[in-house]
Image (cartoon, rainbow, N blue to C red):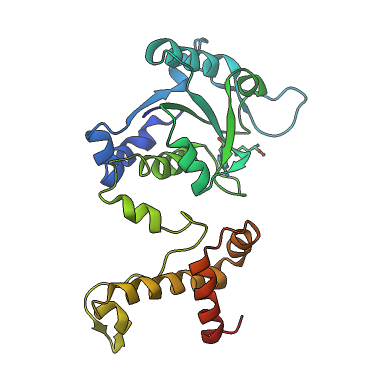
Amino acid sequence: MKIDILTLFPEMFETFLSTSIIGRAVEKEHVTIRTHNIRDFAANKHKQVDDYPYGGGAGMVMMVQPLSDAIKYVLDNYHEKKPKTIYLSPQGIVLTQGLAQQLAKEDSLILICGHYEGIDQRVIDMYVDMEISIGDYVLTGGEIPAMVLVDCVTRLIPGVLGSSESILEESHSNSLLEYPQYTRPAVYDGIAVPEVLLSGNHKEIEKWRKIQSLKKTLQSRPDLFLKKCTATTLTEEEKKLLKELENIIEL
Ligand SMILES: C[S@@+](CC[C@H](N)C(=O)[O-])C[C@H]1O[C@@H](n2cnc3c(N)ncnc32)[C@H](O)[C@@H]1O
């Protein structure tokens, strides 16, 4: 996958793109990520990229010319087909694991990071295919949302994570949260790891994990649980395990 990020602060991405799993994915060329400084495309002599909003009001708006020229530069120099172009915005649809899974299938993406009061609407009208929010709150800029999107999409690209199974069992991958995890030592400060995990009985371990996953989702994210039930995506096995869970906790 190829990702072009348009930003006023490319330096914010340096550590992110060279560290940990994302750093390795870049190094192994599972993903090519380029950052472009929007200010480099400002045509005026002061390299100004923002201006007062028409109609008045607080704050500044990112101007159409530098952004439009930055997008044209990326399209002309790096892509034969227009990549899905995303504006990170608190007004967008909220990013979910499902959306990340869809985006991971794209060949290329352009991400636009806004600042100030946002970007001139004409950029959205001319180029943007999708506005994506990382949650119902407002940040100062689109760089952190772009990193969030790049991170959750990149780790879904085949080959990036060691084990593809770990993706299947992760929280949100099947509308459930993941079961609790433990590692050595078996007892710490008097608190022991659940016995079943030390038993070596893989069938029992799998069953325990599925029950814990249902329990955790019910307790922490009843909204997710309800969505899974109303979408009738509960498997027959999950329905059976739920019956057992009813005996353990009060529903
Ligand atoms: C201060 S915000 C602008 C908010 C805008 N005035 C509004 O009310 O919708 C500046 C930039 O941060 C980014 N941003 C802020 N919150 C975000 C969120 N929850 N998700 C994605 N991007 C966000 C966007 O790129 C936005 O253009």
Q: Quadrant of ligand 1?
A: top right
Q: Nearer the viewer, residue 221 or 208?
A: 208
Tell me where residue 18 appears, x and y as whole percent: 27, 39
Does residue 140 sit above or below 222 in this rendering? above
Looking at the rendering, in which quadrant would you find the C terminus? Answer: bottom right
Residue 116 visible within the image: yes
The picture places residue 125, in percent across and down from the top left corner, at 65, 21
In the displayed structure, 90 sits above or below 248; it is above
Viewer-nearest residue: 231 or 153: 231
Q: Is residue 251 left or right of residue 245?
A: right
**Residue 82 point in image, percent of width and height:** 49, 17
Specify the farthest residue to the bottom. 190
Q: Nearer the viewer, residue 90 or 44?
A: 90
Would you say 164 lies left or right of 152 here? left
Residue at image coords 38%, 11%: 77
| Residue most extreme to the front | 236
Question: Quarter holding the N terminus?
Answer: top left
Q: Is residue 114 visible?
A: no
Q: Residue at x 51, y 46 (%)?
A: 98
